Image (cartoon, rainbow, N blue to C red):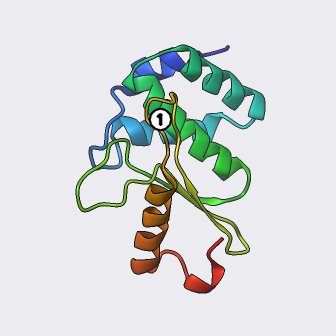
């Protein structure tokens, strides 16, 4: 049985940054981890996100990109969907088994360009919080 991303999102509920282990975002991420094992499935869901506008699919795309990091063997920290003053605003932080770090930003349009200075600020904040060891920053 093939399930579309829209059907999954309808079942899990509105993706947002609400805290908790049984929130829609955590149910969605758990669904991915427990049920999506093939790159082809991820590709199909990513393509559906790109074809479909709206916050729900944009947020799902962010989680799918981070899930790709998980499939590649990275330890993934999912970022917030929406920025909050006083918190680091990255979309994802991946750490490889060898200590290589990647800060992820996901955009569906060129209207909101990713500025290099913003990414550098995220890295600086992660270093300040000791989530990036200075000697292994890449």
Residue 111 found in image quarter: top left
Query: In the image, what residue occupies the spot 50% across and 27% down?
Result: 109
Is 43 situated left or right of 130 in this image? Answer: right
Query: In the image, what residue occupies the spot 46% across and 59% down?
Result: 117
Q: Is residue 51 above or below residue 78?
A: above
Query: In the image, what residue occupies the spot 47% across and 49% down?
Result: 91
Q: Is residue 105 above or below residue 54?
A: below
**Looking at the image, which is closer to me, 9 or 44?**
44
**Looking at the image, which is closer to me, 95 or 112?**
112
Quadrant including the N terminus = top right
Q: Which residue is identified by label 1?
A: 28
Quadrant including the C terminus = bottom right
Q: Residue 3: x, y in percent?
A: 60, 16
Q: Residue 70: x, y in percent?
A: 65, 51
**Looking at the image, which is closer to me, 49 or 23?**
49
Q: Residue 105: x, y in percent?
A: 52, 47
- SS at mark 1? helix
Is 98 situated left or right of 58 in this image? Answer: right
Query: In the image, what residue occupies the spot 63% across and 34% down?
Result: 35
């Amino acid at each position: 049985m093939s399930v579309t991303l829209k059907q999954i999102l309808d079942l899990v509920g509105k993706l947002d940054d609400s805290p908790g282990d049984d929130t829609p975002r955590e149910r969605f991420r758990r669904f991915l981890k427990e049920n999506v094992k093939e790159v082809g499935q991820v590709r199909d869901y990513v393509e559906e996100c790109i074809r479909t506008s709206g916050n729900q699919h944009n947020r799902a795309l962010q989680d799918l990109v981070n899930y790709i990091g998980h499939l590649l063997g990275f330890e993934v920290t999912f970022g917030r969907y929406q920025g909050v003053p006083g918190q680091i605003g990255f979309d994802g932080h991946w750490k490889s088994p060898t200590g290589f770090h990647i800060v992820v930003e996901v955009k569906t349009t060129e209207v909101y360009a990713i500025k290099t200075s913003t990414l550098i600020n995220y890295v600086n904040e992660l270093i300040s919080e000791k989530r990036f060891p200075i000697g292994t920053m890449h």
